[in-house]
């Protein structure tokens, strides 16, 4: 009975650590993606209105363009 209890506890602990690891991985990925999006936004925002127009964007559309695939 004790061995069975120890096995269940080990399995539960492993599951907990796996979930924590997955949460940490997802958080790191989200932060990385946010940094890339902000870098893209700042690069576009530094462009002149004429440069933006040549690539089919307007200044007011930058946020929607950068985050459009996130919905």
Image: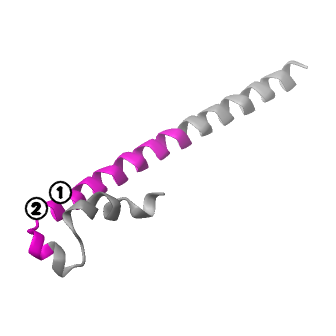
Q: Left or right: where does residue 41 sit relative to residue 50? A: right
The verdict on residue 39 being magenta is yes
The verdict on residue 15 being magenta is no
Residue at 61% across, 38% down: 19
Query: Whole-Å distance between the Cαs marked 1 and 2?
Result: 6 Å
Q: Which residue is mark 2?
A: 46
The way the protein has been coloured in the rendering is one colour
Q: Considering only vertical position in the picture, is 55 above or below 16?
A: below
| Magenta segment boundaries in residue numbering | 22-51
Residue 37 placement (x, y as % from top left): 30, 57
The answer to whether mark 1 and mark 2 are in CB contact below 8 A is: yes
Q: Which residue is mark 1?
A: 42
Residue at 75% across, 25% down: 9
Magenta: predominant secondary structure element?
helix
Q: Left or right: where does residue 70 sit relative to residue 38? A: right
**Which element type, helix, strand or loop, lies under badge 1?**
helix
């Amino acid at each position: 009975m004790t061995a069975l209890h120890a096995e269940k506890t080990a399995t539960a602990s492993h599951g907990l650590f796996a979930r924590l690891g997955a949460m940490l991985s997802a958080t790191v990925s989200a932060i990385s993606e946010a940094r890339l999006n902000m870098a893209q936004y700042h690069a576009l925002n530094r462009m002149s209105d004429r440069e933006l127009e040549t690539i089919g964007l307007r200044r007011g559309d930058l946020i929607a363009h950068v985050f459009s695939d996130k919905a």
